[in-house]
Amino acid sequence: MADSLWIDALCINQDDRNEKTHQVAMMGRIYQEAEEVLIWLGEPGIIPFAGHEHAVAGASKTGINIADGIECLQLLASGKHFHDLPCFGRCRSQTCPSSRGVVSTSWRNTLQALRAISNAKWFERTWTIQKLVLARKPSVLIGGHLIAWDVLEQAWIEWARHLKSCCGECDFTLAESDIECLHRFSTRMIDLFNAKRRLERGQTLLLPLLNFKSRDATDKRDKIYGLLSLQSGSAIVNIRPNYNLALEDVFVKFAKELVYSQGWLVPLHLDLARDLVLPSWVPDWTHRSTEPADFTFARFTGSSTYRASDGFQGCYSFSSNHTLKVTGIEIDRIVRLSIPYQFKERPAEQLQLVAHWRDFLDLQNLAHNKYVGGGTREQAFFSTMFANRFHDAGKCRPLLSDDIQNWQEHLVKTSERLREEGPRATLKLNPTMNSHIKATPGRRLFVSSKGYIGVCPEDAQENDELFVLYYCHAPIVLRPVGEKSRLRKNRYTALGHAYFHGLMEGEAVQMNLPRRQVLIV
């Protein structure tokens, strides 16, 4: 143990805005240069939860022993199969590689300990991310137990590997709450694991912001400032801590600097739902989304690969009252909208949502009809179900016909398993289904006045307009502000980007439609 300890909560005067401004700018270097970083999850025997405290000491009334949880993580890290861990019951899968099943009376304690660890408040805070990601030697201190972060990380790697291969269909007779616990642990680890790797390769500030948007901060300005040390490479967002600025001013300044540093209108491709009073083109980083962060990240990554404005010559500017002025082409308007596609984990519910969207387009009768953008209506539907992008292992590429065929086969097999085993059937993870559910949650299927189909933000309404804007990779959904009088003409609020099947590769720019200046307020 080092002779000196630096504890940010004590070593920075939290009530002095000027001192915070100076010290926060140095925190990245402090954690990078520390000999060791200790991650403290709570007082001995107590793991603080978000909203309450939960006793975890071996002598507590709950009987939860942290040592059981640590043992399970160490076994996972060593490469053990799921069924070889003391927390799992006997496996009944026909394809399980295990020659035996392990039944242990300690499995309940183990899972409760893992739940206590993964639900700790530490995982809910924005500032904790850079402390771990930048540290040379991070360790976790849980009561009287110390475990190296490398062991936790390796446990997640092995968990993911087994889940995708040999143990993907194993039936452990676990309760839903137990499965949720293990999934939560995996999610916690993958976010931090990826953050470390991306920093090593070079990343913009936007990536950790998207991945950790659900993290909380006492001072909401730290939703930005707490991640500044996690950007690397050439596209650095030029913003420094300033606790004398109002929260809204910090978010507006960041949105502008994001455009300047990235070279395109990035904010319009992000989630624009808001709780704060902000210009509609400025993301509200305090707004909590219900969808998993990796879905939001995947959808943004996909949107940045489109070329809807290819060949479009125009300009953009910001006014003194934070209005965004940009050249645009109005290409269509929304005339019909489906119900929102909400993320569902159970296969039966996933199939039900797909069936509803098929019915919305009446594919039972119109599947082979010609689609206005080329091909058939059914082909357009299947591409739209993925927003024409396939996501796997953090990478994004255009959708292939083989991907659609694989997905269709998966839907058939899923239906058969559901008929045989009921709504709780155990199913192996499918990469094409994973891509589909990343493209569609929180979105609506729409039909435009010209017969195009696509997916758009959940808050979209009928008669909202679809634009291709200069400096935007994807079409943007805009809503007129008030009556289109002479004084208010061309004033809009932004709702976010859309996938517009048949108009994502510069086709609208070639249609010679009228161009005009659009004011986004």
Image (cartoon, helix red, strand yellow):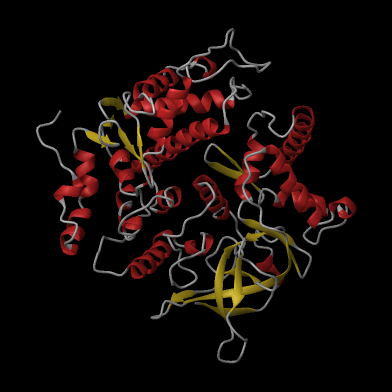
Residue 113 occupies which quadrant of the picture? top left
Residue 64 occupies which quadrant of the picture? top left
The residue lying toward the viewer, choosing from 55 and 76, is 55
Q: Is residue 25 visible?
A: no
Task: Please name the residue shown 72% across and 39% down the image.
Answer: 348
Total of numbered circles in the picture? 0
Task: Please name the residue shown 83% across and 53% down the image.
Answer: 376
The residue lying toward the viewer, choosing from 174 and 236, is 174
Q: Is residue 26 visible?
A: yes
Q: Is residue 339 above or below residue 70?
A: below
The x, y position of residue 449, in whole percent, is 76, 70
Most distant residue in the top direction: 99
**Split into 4 quadrants, where in the image is the N terminus?**
top left
Task: Please name the residue shown 74% across and 31% down the image.
Answer: 422
The x, y position of residue 86, in whole percent, is 47, 16
Task: Please name the residue shown 52% across and 17% down the image.
Answer: 81
The x, y position of residue 494, in whole percent, is 55, 70
Residue 462 occupies which quadrant of the picture? bottom right
Q: Is residue 179 above or below residue 465?
A: above
In the shown orientation, is residue 402 left or right of residue 187?
right
In the shown orientation, is residue 404 left or right of residue 289?
right
The x, y position of residue 60, in whole percent, is 33, 28
Most distant residue in the left direction: 3
